[in-house]
Image (cartoon, rainbow, N blue to C red):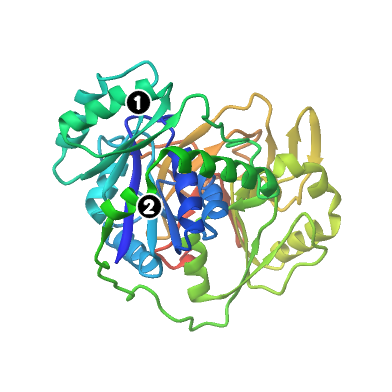
Amino acid sequence: MNTHFLIGAANSGAGKTTLTIGLLRILKDKGLKVQPFKCGPDYIDTKYHAVASGNEAVNLDVWFSSEKHMHDVYDYYSSQSDCCVTEGVMGLFDGYDKMKGSSASISAALHIPVILVINADSSAYSVAPMIYGFMKFRSDVKIAGVIFNMVSSESHFSFLKDACNDIGVECFGYIPKSGTISIPSRHLGLTIGKKDEMESYVHQTAELVKQHVDIDRIINKCTVANRHEDLSFKTERQSSLKIAIAHDEAFNFTYRENIENLRRIADVCYFSPLHDNNLPEADVLYLPGGYPELYAQQLQNNVAIKKQIKDFAEHDGKIFAECGGMIYLGKTLKFNDKIYEMSGVLPIDSTMDNAKLTLGYRSMIYKGQEYRGHEFHYSHTVNPDVIPSVATQYSARGKATSVPLYREGQVIAGYTHWYWGDKNFMDFWK
């Protein structure tokens, strides 16, 4: 028997992440092996999931891959766990195209019951028709119960419980308005180097949720027979390829299944552009996204590793870089009115001046293969056309974008974070 549920909400900002983090830690403290999942392309909430559960989170995203691949991934990781907790994205039915890619579509495809989080601030019995609408809108999306957030008092909660009773939906509890905790440094500024801060937040959140939410009722309501397990997509490594991944406070935005897929084709190791003086022996370097701007001085000062990376590129070493990794491969990075020297592999200059969030799903055809990913960044390149783009990237609605994919020698780089959990990573160089 396994426990499965998805934390969804009527809208963004309702408290999904707070509740998910609290439940993950409570379930872990009960001695259960907990596997967190995240709907969509987020790689920041998943870091909190890992701290809370002790297990690395897995992204579920039907834009990135086929529904079958998502099934395979979910079944594989859930088969090794007692409890699977999936955090939704945005409002329950919000997708990249109507319901497509939404938490509801993932719930329906994987048959995961939904616990609906409702922000009850400034509302009471009127939540009844809203919840009823969510219950009845799609018969293939099963609402297991409701948890309310921003509840001002026990009297307020009694009205909310009456609403649940009258429409026949379980109420698992609430999070009080006075006790609501804000996630520290959730986006720009959150790094894996602040784990003490993250741990403190996780602990406080778990204590709050434990006081007001009936965890045992959730487990009883959402426990089902073990799911069918298909491990055919997991294959043993049959290659002597070596891939070195940059991983430290500055570079850490990765998808778990991407890394697991690399392990299936190569011997994977890690290195730190911040702290290491020597590159490991490798055939390929992977530089993922992160926060190079917050560590720009340290990156500039580590001349030894920058020189080795540049030498690696000049001797036809294969390098794949995304977002922050691409910035590090460039000539300079301007941040807080200071210009820092990067590795100089690519002739691009990046800046945080006039920082503006750019985000969205992306797709492209490159070397005859379709790739899909997600763009999320505040910086921009000063001279984006200094290298011609080798592929046109499109939005989820099929509109051409201006975001480039750079290719110089064996170096491939760009702003988009690509997903290759269902592909052969080495096809980028075929």
Disc 1 and disc 2: Cα gap in Å?
Answer: 40 Å
- Residue 50 in percent (x, y) is at 54, 54
Mark 2 — residue? 64
For the N terminus, give its image quadrant: bottom left
Q: Secondary structure at mark 1?
A: helix
> Upstream in the sequence, badge 1 or badge 2?
2
The residue depicted at 34 percent of the width and 56 percent of the height is 65
Q: Is residue 240 above or below residue 357?
A: below
| Residue 225, percent from left and from top | 24, 66
- Using the rendered image of the protein, determine whether residue 100 is visible from the camera's viewpoint: no
Name the residue carrying label 1: 157
Towards the viewer: 216 or 357 = 216
Task: Decide: is 250 above or below 385.
Answer: below
Q: Residue at the location (57% across, 82% down)?
A: 240
**Residue at figure coordinates x 40%, y 70% from the top left:** 80
User: Is 419 left, or right, of 194 in this rendering?
Assistant: left
Query: On the rendered structure, is 242 left or right of 403?
Result: right
Residue flagged by tag 1: what amino acid is it?
A: Phe
Give the crowd class for mark 2: few <14, some 14-19, many >=20 residues within 10 Å: many
Left of 24 or right of it: where is 6? left
- Report helix, strand or loop for mark 2: loop
